[in-house]
Image: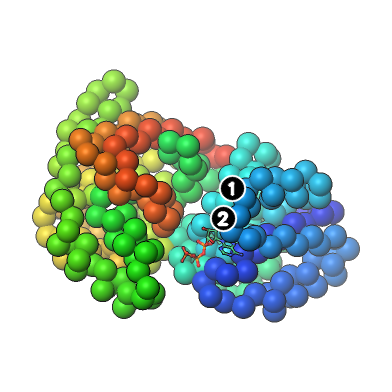
Amino acid sequence: MADFRNILMVVNPISGGEEKEDLIKEVRQAVEKNNYKFHLFKTTGENDIPKIKEEIDQVQPERVLVVGGDGTVKIVAEALFHKDLPIAIFPAGSANGLALNVGIPENRKQQIEVAMGDHFTNLDVLQVNDELCLHLSDIGLNAELIKNYESASIRGKFGYLMQSIPTLVRSKYPYEYEVEIDGKVYNHKGIMLAIANCQKYGTGAKINPEGRHDDGKFEIVIFKNLDITEILGTLREDVKFNPDFAETISTEQAIISCKTPIAFQIDGEFIENTQKIEVKIAEKSLKIAVK
Ligand SMILES: Nc1ncnc2c1ncn2[C@@H]1O[C@H](COP(=O)(O)OP(=O)(O)OP(=O)(O)O)[C@@H](O)[C@H]1O
């Protein structure tokens, strides 16, 4: 067991629609049993980033445990960016893509062992316009689906499916993407362009099989306008990635421009319709406890 004195646990009480009191109790017991001080912060959905920053300044934790989905991990990562402070993830969202990519176990006892342990991975963090991206961002059809799903009243897989048809009908794909890397300009047409720091979406769909989260690089994956049903299948289910309908570029920075504003999402959250995205990498800048 590591020797740390204060531990801060950040819990999103609403993520994944799950009740979290049992988990909090179990983790608190494990922490206190080892004579460490346990501090709890519950997110409210309002100004959480500055509030977590304040909490970190007050508590001076040596580790931050995060209970939530990708959105909650992103909020915590924004709050401790450029601080040398490790996090541990307890996946508890409707999408837990980052936890899946770094191999957080599903079993709670093992999750507690990982959270208290001494094994870490150093995740590259992408700076995408003014936001951080921890695993996958995209511009095009998938982001449009997320936007329509977020505003729909029906949740779950059925809601997602219900949104797929009108989104496909209304969408103006193929989109034209201009990708600028080190002063060189590449023009592509496609139904979506993904900015991938890791290999998989939270659904398990592997769109970037060669990607590594700690290699100082990210991949731009452009899905060409081929078989839309196959592409949707690849995004939603664990269908094997078919390289015939995608082109991958590995890089450390890029500027992506589009002729018209296109839907854009980061780590599963719709951001806005945008025409320009600048991506930089902050190499190995988030330390995460792993198995
Ligand atoms: N107490 C709260 N009430 C309402 N929203 C909250 C609260 N705490 C955090 N949030 C919001 O929850 C979102 C993050 O949720 P997260 O992605 O971790 O879980 P999720 O179940 O996967 O959510 P979603 O399905 O909405 O993506 C952020 O938008 C954040 O602002």
In the visual, does 153 lie left or right of 61? Answer: left
Q: Which residue is mark 2?
A: 73
Q: Is mark 2 within 8 Å of ligand 1?
A: yes
**Amino acid at the residue labelled 1:** Ala
Q: Is residue 46 left or right of residue 217?
A: right
Disc 2 marks a residue whose amino acid type is Val
Q: Along the line of sight, which residue is nearer the eye, 132 or 207?
A: 132
The residue at the point 12 percent across, 60 percent down is 227
SS class, disc 1? helix
Quarter of the figure with residue 8 = bottom right
> Does the image show residue 205?
no
**Direction right: furthest residue:** 35
Label 1: how many residues lie within 10 Å, few (<14), some (14-19) or many (20+)?
many
Image quadrant assignment for residue 285 = top right
Measured as percent of width and height from the top left, residue 166 is found at 20, 66
Above or below, 112 relative to 22: above
The residue under the point 74% across, 75% down is 26
Q: Position of residue 136 (x, y in %)?
A: 40, 51
Residue 53 place in picture, x, y as percent = 70, 45
Q: Label 1 belongs to which residue?
A: 77
Q: Secondary structure at mark 2?
A: helix
Q: Are marks 1 and 2 in contact (CB under 8 Å)?
A: yes
